[in-house]
Image: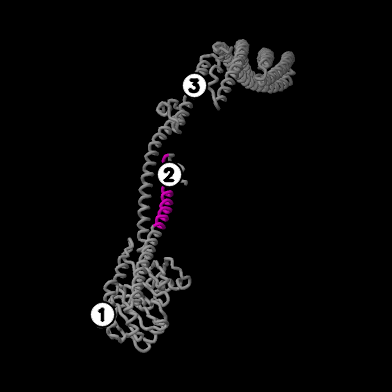
Amino acid sequence: MKFLVNRKLATRISIITTVIIFVGMLLLWFVVSSRAASMVKSNITNQMTDAVESRAAIINDYVASAEEYLKAFSLSSEVQDLLKQPQDDALRLKGQKYTEDFASVKGVFEGLYIGTPDTYILTHTSQGAIGMTTREGDSLDVFRDTILSKPQLTNLGIMESPGTGSMIISMYYPVFDNDNCIGYVGAGVYASRLMDALLDLDIEGLPNSEYVFLNAETGMYMYHEDEALLNTETTDKGYLKILEKIRSDGSTQAGTYSYQDEDGVNQLVVYKYLKDRNWVFMVRDNASEVYREVGAVRITVGVLCAIVAAVIILVSVLILFRVGRELMVMEGAIRRLGKLELSADQELESFYEREDEIGMIAQTIHHVCDCLRKTIDDIGRILGEMAAGNIAVDVAKNESYYIGDFRILAESLKSIRAHLTTVMRDIAQIANQVNSGANQVSAGAQALSQGTVQQKDSINGLVENVTDITAQIKGSTVRCNDATDLVDRAAGYAAEADTKMEQLTAATRNLDQSSSQIVSIIKTIEDIAFQTNILALNAAVEAARAGTAGKGFSVVADEVRSLAAKSAEAAGDTSTLIGRSLNDVKTGTESTNLVISAMQVINDCIQSIKTLMDDIALASAQQSEMIVSVENRIKEVSRVTEANSDAAEESAAISNELSNQAKTLNQLIGQFRIQ
C-alpha cells in the first residue's frame, strides 16, 4: 500500500473503492456463476433425467401395450383351438384370418404369427412365412428350454426383422394347456414407432445425444444408432460400470454417471433401469457439450458483473470527482490557513450550511480563521499600545478570544507586560543612577583635563631648562678643550725654559697671566658645576613629580649631580694647584736659582693639570650625553603628558556626551506609561 501514501484522498478512495468493487464483483461473479452453473447443470441433468424417465415410460408403455396385445391374442379361442388341432385346415384358416385382423386392428405388429412347439408357423401376417420352421436342432432345444418352458412373455428386445429387414421388438408368449405347452404366439412389434419416440427426444442444447438400450443381465445392445452393434455385447467402460452398479443395487431411479471414454473425451450418461424388462435405457453426450451452456452462463454473468462494476465505479468516480473537487477547495483553504492567510475561509461560505463531513471541515476552518483573526487583532492592539508607550495596556480585556492552546499566549502576554513594567522601572532607576554617575565622571574628567594641561606646561618648562643646561654643558666642553690647549702650551713653555732663561721672566709673567686665566676658568668650572648641581636637583624634583614616567629621568639627574660634584671637586683641586703654582712662580721670581727645580715642578703640575683637564673634558662630554638623554626622556614624558591631556579632554567630551545621553534616556523612559 506504499503507492497510496502520497496520493490525494479522493484518488486513494477511488483506487480502494475500485479494488473493493472489483473484488466484490469477482466474488459475486464466482458465487453467482457457480450457483448459475450449478443450476444450469442441474437443469440439464434434470432435462436429461426427465427425458430418460419420460422416454422410458413411453417405451415401457409401448412395449407393455404390445405385450398385452400379444397376451390377449394368445388367449383368443381361435389361437387356442388351432394350437390344440394344428392339422385342422378350417381352424388354420380361421386362425389366419384372426391373426391378420388382430394385427390390422392393433397396428403395432410388423409380424404376428402362431407356431407349434417345433417352431412350425401355422399363421402369419406375412403369407410367405406360413409353413416355415424357424428353429431346428440345438436352437430349437434352447428355445424350448427357455422361452417355452414356462407360461410368461419373453421379450428379446429390438432386432432386425429376418423377413423385411425392419427393426422390430421380438416377443414370444407360450400357450399352455394345463401344464403342457401346446405352442406359442410370436410377434415382431414395430420398433420404428419406438425409434420415432426416441428420436423425438430433443433435449434443449443437446442435439447430438446418443441413446441406447442394454440388456441389464447380458450387456447386449437392444438398441443402438449403429445397427452393427445390435445384439452385441457392449465394451464401453462407462456402460459396463453402470450395468455393474445396477446389478449391485437394482435401483430403478434415474441416475447419472460421468467418465472419460477411450478417446479421452468426458462423457455424461443418464440412465433408467426398467426392472420389469431387465432393460437399461441410457442417454449419453459429450460433457463439454452438455455444460457448454454453463460456460455461456459464466460468461454472461461475468459480463453483467463487469457492466455493473463499471457502472458502480463510474458512479463512484463521478461522486468522488465531485467530492474530490470539494476536498480540493478544502485542501486549498487548509493550505492557505497553513500559510496563516486568515481569509482562507472566504471561499467556503457555500459549505457552511451542509451537515456532512465537508460542511464540518468548512465550519471548522471558518471557526479557526475567526479565532485567529480575533486573537491576532487583539495581539496587534496590545503590541500597538505597547509600541506607543502604554506598557500598562489591558491584556485581559479580550481574554475570551484565547482558547485552547492560545491560553498560553494570553498568559505569555500578561507575563510580558509584567516583566516589561518591572524592566522599565529598573531601567528608569538605572538611568537616573547613570545620569548622576555621568555628571560625576564629567566633573572628574574636567578636573583631570585641567591638571593635565598644567602638567604639560610644567614639562614644557622643564624641557626648556634642560635645553639650556645642554647648551651650557656644551660650552663647558669647549672651554675645557681650550684649557687643554693652554696646558699644552704651558708645557712647551716649560720645556723652553731650560734653554731660554732670559725668557723666564716673560714666561713667568705669562704663567702668571695663564694662572690668572686658569683661576678664572676654574672659577667658571666651579660655577658650571654649581649650576649643574642645581639643575640636577631641579630635574630630580621634577622627576619625582612625574612619578613612574620620570623614574629614568631621576636616575639621569642623579648621575648629572654626581658628575657636577666631581667637576666641583676637580675644580677645587685645580684651584689649589694653581695657587701653589702662583706661589711657586712668585718664589721662582724671587729666586732664579730655584728656576730649574721650579720649572720641573711647574712641568709636573702642568701635566697634572692636563690630566685633570682631560678628565674634566671627558666628564663634560658625558654630562652632555646624559643631558641629551634627559632631554629626550623629558620630551618623551612631554609627549605622554600631551597624549594624556588629549585623552583627558576626549574623556571630558565623552563624559559630557554620556551625561547628555543619560538625560535623553530619562526623557525616552518618561514616554512609557507603566502605571
Residue located beneath label 2 in the image: 17
In space, the residues marked 3 and 2 are separated at their CA atoms by 42 Å
Q: Position of residue 325 (x, y in %)?
A: 39, 35
In space, the residues marked 2 and 1 are separated at their CA atoms by 83 Å
Number of numbered tags placed on the structure image: 3
**Is 420 situated left or right of 192 in this image?**
right
Indicate whether residue 33 is drawn in magenta. yes
Looking at marks 3 and 2 on the same chain, the residue that comes earlier in the sequence is marked by: 2
**Is 125 situated left or right of 307 in this image?**
left
Looking at marks 1 and 3 on the same chain, the residue that comes earlier in the sequence is marked by: 1
- Say which of 198 and 458 sits in front: 198
User: Few, some or many C-alpha atoms within 10 Å of disc 2 (few <14, some 14-19, many ≥20)?
Assistant: some
Residue type highlighted by circle 1: Ser
**Is 510 situated left or right of 284 in this image?**
right
Q: Position of residue 469 (x, y in %)?
A: 63, 15
Residue located beneath label 3 in the image: 374
Residue type highlighted by circle 2: Thr
Residue under the image location 36 percent in, 83 percent down: 183
Residue located beneath label 1 in the image: 126
